Amino acid sequence: MKISSAFWTNLDQVFVLLQHWIEGFFPQWLQPAIGTVLAVVAIVAAFPGIFALTTVLERKGLGRIQNRLGPNRVGPLGILQPIADGIKSLTKEDIVPLTADAAVHFLAPVVLVIAVFLGFAVLPVGRNMVLVNLDAGLLFFFAIGASTELSIFMAGWSSRNKYSLLGAMRAVAQMISYEVPLLLSSVVAVMITGSLSTVKIVEAQSGFTGILPHWYVFTPWGFAGFVLFVIAALAETNRSPFDLPEGESELVAGYFTEYSGFKFALFFLGEYLAMFSIAGFAITLFLGGWGAPLSILGFIPSWAWFFAKLLAGILFFIWLRGTLPRLRQDQLMNFAWKFMLPMSLLNLLVAGAWRFLGDGWSRWVVCSAVLLVAYVLLGRVLMHHQHLGARSYRYAE
Amino acid sequence: MTPLAAFLIVAALVFAIGFAISLTRRNAILVLIGIELMLNAANLNLIAFWRFGPYPEALTGMMFAIFSIAVAAAEAAVGLGLVIAYHRQSKTTDLDAMTRMKG
Amino acid sequence: MMTTSASLIATWLVQQTPPQFASSGIVNALWLIPAIPMVAAGLIALLKQPSKKAAAALAIGGLACSLLFAIVAFIHVLAAWGSSAPTREVVNFTWIDLGATHLQLGWMLDPLAAIMLVMVTFVGLLIFIYSTGYMAHDENFTRFFCFLSLFAGGMLGVLIANSLLLLFMCWEIVGLTSYLLIGFWYHKPSAAAAAKKAFLTTRVGDIFFLLGIVWLFANTGTLLFYNNGAGAMEPTALATLLSQPAAWGLTAATAIGLLIFAGAAGKSGQLPLHVWLPDAMEGPTPVSALIHAATMVAAGVYLVARVYPLMSAGSVAGGSTISLTVVAWIGALTALFGALVAVAQNDIKRILAYSTISQLGYMMVGLAVGGVAVGIFHLITHAFFKALLFLGAGSVIHGCDEEQDIRRMGRLWKAMPITFATYAVGMLALSGFPIVFSGFWSKDAIIGAAHNWPVSKGPFVLLLIGALLTAFYMTRQVFYVFFGTWRGDIHAHAHESPRVMTVPLAILAVFAIGLGVLGTPAWPWFTSFIESKSLTLDWQGFSEPGLISLMSFAILLVAVGLGTGWWLYSVKPIRNAEQEDVLEAATPTVFGWLARRLYFDELYEATVLRWYAALAWFSDWLDRRVWGGIVAIVSNSFRGLGSVNKSVDSQWIDGVFDKGCDELVTSGGVLAWLQAGRAPGYLRLMGIGVLVLAGLALALGAATGQVRL
Amino acid sequence: MIFGLSIIFILTSILTVAGALAAALLKNLVHCALSLTVTFAGLALLYLQLDAQFAGFSQILVYIGAVAILVVFAILLTRGSGIPEYRNFSTSWFAGLAIAAGIFALLAWAVLKSLPTSVASAAPQVTVQQIGLALMSSYVLPLEIVAVLLTVALIGAVIVAMPESRDPKSNSTQGGAE
């Protein structure tokens, strides 16, 4: 038992140990830099790998949902499809429209990918496995996330194409609108933890009651926050059903209509990486990060849990994409400002109440009741006044 | 460690550029951009003085900068709203052409 | 966390210096008197537009509470007077701590404030009640009462202020609300213009006032009037001010006094700054009554009364000071001017407006030559009978379907008996009809004091002529309005106003008669009260040398005025509206001048505005030639040389007048161009200012060692 | 280290100033706005060098995430994408430039003369928690005021930028406004 415990601990820390081992080859003063470089290399290698996996998963998954096969020609069951895609995009001609603003057109995907990669810097993917443990980690993530909007605008504007511009404007409006509930719904976790550090937030959820974990999602406010966060995350990453900015049927892929070849691939990569990072943060904030879901499963390495959860999240996103229809622009905006925002504000209050109501069972009843009543009332009022239904063409005069 | 004076010089440079933008450009939005630059330069000064001051634990300079950032956001929102409203009325953002005091 | 912030706010509040409270309860609660109407105004502002009843109830209820408090305060002062306790009590507190020094605010209760409080709240209350009838059909009823209430609050704040700064703040509230009220019907361009004119003209005075305040603070370090020997109106500070020379051989006391008087002149419509007051008639009539009778114009007079110690500082026994002399002369000229112009007006409210200007002149003279009590007594009596006249005029206008031209009225005594009766009382009081009416006693006190003034007999003579004219123009107005034949629209039927309007008239009429008792020479209750002296009934008061003969002479003048009016306007009744005025027929030129208000507005247009245009031209020149860049200067100077040659030629050939007209047009255009709000120009000037000031601060600071460079 | 300045500092300040200069000189308004974000980012990096993490991230979140986007939106809404139809610089640009240069000269002179060498104390350990506590205790009043200000600004900006309603009813009640 003792031996096996040491084995599991080592397995849990295998990447950390590996990093220290490699660092050992270098002089003392160079070691911190080398450690950082190694971690960066790991991130830059791992997540695009998942990206490759996801593309094939998504295509096959969507295929199954739509009752067809999906890619099945390259490699066994088509799993080598991403390699073929990669080679294709690298060898395709890179077309820049004649009237386009060449510099900005080039910079847009680069800025996007850089910004998205930066977001992973504060994501704890396992015990002791975070690139920088920033005191203001969550703030850093949101700050970086906010700057991706700019790259989307750059792409749409520089293409000199009305569909691109329209798509970019839609995307920016949507991202700004949903950033508010995204931020507010994540604040509850910060409030209860008392820290903006992602590592501390995960550690705060690492305890167990019996065999059940202390994940925030198992509290009323945590559940509401998680649902709000996931909805906002879908919108933030322009995933279906919030994929208006790129809606193929109306905008011909929106802001990256005019991109081809490698730049298009970069955009594609950036989009998916953004999805991973935001899913990773949903896991970190509400699903216990790298923590095991049951205390008896605690022996499995933390990073394995994290990536398992991440994979589950990605599959969930794919499932949603395959089943939900696309929203209309006014519904999208109304939903953000009239439903998401009030609910997340209320959730803040509920989290505060939770904190001050003490340990008894009463807080469970009070918090759940408040959220449930608010949800029902708000939904009824909005449906009754058709804020989520009727069309109004205010901005299309 | 970089000395305080270096930060102050950078701030002064940004401030002067912001001021030059507000004075020389004709587009109202660019003038607002200039004002934002000036505010930012002031923030840099605040933080630099906070860091180099005798009592950084008191957080005063940093708090000033944070509040100033918040106020700048409000200023930008209102300012740009005004420019858009003006543009809707008279179809120009040229400050030299904005010669009517009332809408 | 909530508790932390709450406790922090509490700590912050406690850290503020608590007021030095006075001993008696009513003095401590005095701030409620202005605060209640202000709160009422705030509440009314939150009401919805149709809730007229609630608005009126709030406004009237609020002012009634203030009246109650004012009466309690008045009784408190009366009691103190009787028991020889100090009649002046102050409550001061620190508003802003400036480190080395601090700005203090405070309020005070003394006989002057007490009597003014009662007068303002009482007259104001009657006007409020009257307004509910007058404005009943206005769709902005609630807005009106909101402004009215705020106005009353500001005015009451002026009255209780023990600090020049607090007084100035409330003074500005009064200014703002008067702007809002005069321009209440802002959809009428004339009303909007009148409001702007009132605001800007009084602002001219206020600038001087503010300068005076700053100067006073710089020299004495306090803005409190009274503060146990450390206030600005107390001997120590006055001695400091007297010892400090200002320019042109004036002492600081004189200069500050004159600056403050400029502010008062703006508010009270004294001669150079009177132009806004007649135009202010564009507001609803209750507003005219409130502004012209009880409050705003009285504020100026009250201010002079408040700073009277400063104005009179340094006078030798029986003599006068420079500032008081200025006040007396300006007041006397204003009195005569207003009376003259009133003779030739045809708008019922304009006549009253000029009459107000004239009477304010009397008050100023009274203050200057006879002391606080004389001027304020006239202020009080005038407040009642002028409010009565204005409300009566409002009733007439209301009854004649918004007709204001007295030539289109006539024979109204039959249709509007109550209005006529009360109006007649007001008119006789204003004219100074002997013995019974209050106006006689208060005006006679002023004339008597002017007669005894050692400096000059000029004001005395001017006031006598004014008195004659006053009686005359009021007779003219009454005969035009109430007698003769009906000259308005044949189909219109003049009708008496509702009870809610006539009852206030009746109450005011009673006071217009009764108040005179308080200020007879035999029983000078008012003077004694204001000056906190003992009072006895002494018929010997009439036997002062010259008093009876002077009174008789004044009565004679009034009789002449009334008689002339009767002879000119009643013996030969006016038949129709187009008929020429008798005086106009006799001396068209003089009448024309008077009707055009002695061309004051035109004079300002020709002087002040032209000067402004020249300034604008100069700024424009600076902007184009100096800031426009060196290249422009060089090229333009060569071109300019040529054009100067050419323009000199063409000027001589084309004639100077043509050129002058063109210049006027261009300078007007330039003025418009300069005022167009081009932000970059302003910003550039600001930048230069920053540069110069910062450079100066650094350079001077380095030179004096205050800045370590 | 060059002249006692760290290389990172030199690079970030060059980035900052270059961004600002580009914003001042470029013709295309969107390019100006984009180079402005470079300046904002550079300033955030400078804050990080001054151990002000929280301020730096706030700077990115607010300025790049919100203000820059707002500016870009405003440019597009005012049909300003591309080059404006009027000349870029006002007629008296010379004066403006001179004033700005004068201000810089003044500031630089004062700075260089008064603070030749001042060295920072050890980096203060400022956690976000401390900032939060300070905001909720000593700075609670400013915080509340800023909250009110932001709300007012938000509503105000919306109202200002909203097209006036063509509802005939509202016209009759404010008929005299012109």
Image (cartoon, coloured by chain):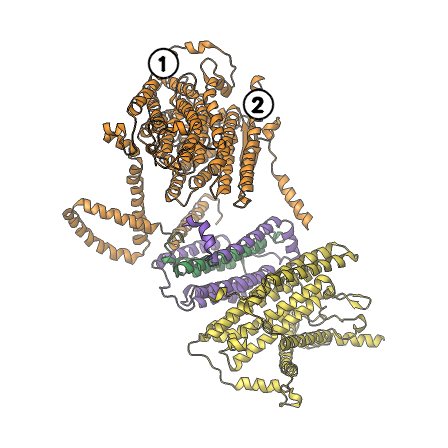
Chain colours: A yellow, B green, C orange, D purple
C427 or A224: which is nearer to us?
Answer: C427
Question: Residue C302 — which label?
Answer: none
C378 left or right, relative to A244: left
Which SS class for mark 2? helix
A245 left or right, relative to C442: right
Where is C530 relative to D127, above or below?
above
Q: Does the rendering let one see residue A322? A: yes
Q: Quadrant of residue C200?
A: top left
Q: Residue furthest right?
A: A1
Q: Residue at x 45, y 19 (%)?
A: C516
C36 or C23: which is nearer to us?
Answer: C36
| Closer mark to the observer between disc 2 and disc 1 | 1
Q: Does the rendering let one see residue B35? A: no
Residue at numbered disc 1: C552
Task: Find residue D30 and report its horizontal and vertical position in percent.
Answer: 45, 67
Separation (CA) of disc 2 from disc 1:
36 Å
Earlier along the polypeptide chain: callout 2 or callout 1? 2
Q: Quadrant of residue C377?
A: top left
Looking at numbered disc 1 in the image, what kind of residue is underneath it?
Answer: Ser
Q: Residues within 10 Å of mark 1 (few under 14, many from 20)?
A: few
Where is C163 relative to A169, above or below?
above
Q: Residue at x 55, y 80 (%)?
A: A265
Task: Find residue C398 and report its horizontal and vertical position in percent.
Answer: 42, 35
Q: Quadrant of residue C265?
A: top left
Residue at numbered disc 2: C75
A312 or C340: which is nearer to us?
Answer: C340
User: What subunit carries mark 2?
Assistant: C
Which SS class for mark 1? helix
On whether disc 2 and disc 1 are found on a single subunit, the reply is: yes
